[in-house]
Image (spheres, grey):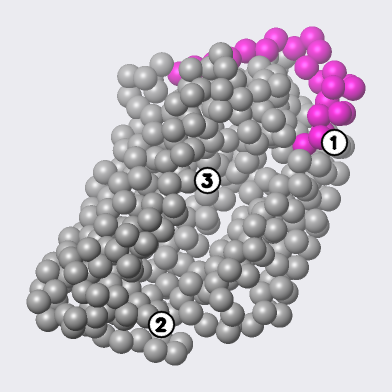
Amino acid sequence: MSAAVLVGDVMVVLFGVLMCVGPLVPRPSLQFGVRVPPGYAKAQVICRERRAYRWRSALIAIAGLAALMALGGHVPPWPSRVILIAEVAADLGCFWWAHQQIVKVKVAEGWFAGRRQMVVADTSWRSDPEAFPARWLVPALGVIVATVIVGVLRYPHLPAYLTRGHHLVATSPASAFAVVLGQLYVTGLWAGLLVLVYRSRPDLDTTDPAGSLRSYRRALGAFGRAGLVFLACVDASVLLFALQLWQVFHLSGGASLLVALPVVAGLSGFLVTVVSAARARARTVLAGTQATDRDDDRYWKGGIVYLNFDDPAVVVGARVAFGWTVNLGNPIAWLLVTGFLAIPVGLVVVRLATGI
């Protein structure tokens, strides 16, 4: 089994668990992407759809794991990616089905009838926004600096050709230091996306704006730190790959999987943090009041995609677990979507341009 196959297999397992748990730990006012008023978080249709989703998503995760076991470890990386895409698509279909069933009952029974719909804001967020945890970016930058130093020291001693997989690449500054370009590219783009998340407006509960903001701050801090630790782990895996490329050491057989261990560990910790943050925010207690959050379901397509041309926000809180999404009604959001998709595309371009 290669490192790429190991990462693909781990992602299938982790995302299978995340898709099982994520939609089941929302805030009480959001159930499967549907805005619900106080007192309806445990409505019969919601409890029924939660049970059904739990079983369906668990079966999908088991099926994905069974497919991986049937393939074995001596396969190219692409089968695990196909399984991952199929797994996520199936879980999203289950989420959409639950969303539609709750919407039907919500509309038929008039859950928001006679309620005062409100939008709340906490001015302390504008005057005292959550500080971006810049110091947690130091490990990733340290790994990049270490990569550059080792590369500079090793470059004069490199052979005329570098071994990349099953083919040889002529040694040049571009081919030797392509790994550093990859590190800088991913680090800059990921850190930039996190900064935008920190500058997005928080989605607060009408029943307890102050308490909701406090829980949001805690969850955002945990999310940011975990995201930057994950980034450092990605850079560490790239460093280990570079050390092999520069012939500092050579790993063969099962030992080659050590290259993927940092990114696997970082991704596992990041996803666990996302679910934990969602669980912490889900503990919000809804008081018995007629005031409720604004019923804005019309802007959320399937409870996942946000499209509001009248909202100037670019990044908004997502309705699944704890995370963010973009407002596709804002043209700037399409630049972010392009930037996010540019991560894998850019790495492929770097690889093709340098021969690595």
User: Can you tell which quarter of the image residue 108 is in?
Assistant: top right
- Residue 66, position in %: x, y? 73, 74
In percent of the image, x 67 and y 28: which residue is there? Answer: 300
Element under disc 2:
loop
Element under disc 3:
helix
Circle 3 Cα neighbour tier, 10 Å, few/some/many (<14 / 14–19 / ≥20): many
Q: Amino acid at mark 3?
A: Ala
**Magenta region:** 99-122
**Which residue is at the front of the view, 13 or 329?**
329
- Residue 246, position in %: x, y? 23, 78
| Location of mark 2 (residue) | 166
The answer to whether residue 319 is magenta is: no
| Location of mark 3 (residue) | 277
In percent of the image, x 78 and y 63: which residue is there? Answer: 59
Residue 251 in view in this figure: yes
Alpha carbons under labels 1 and 2: distance apart: 52 Å
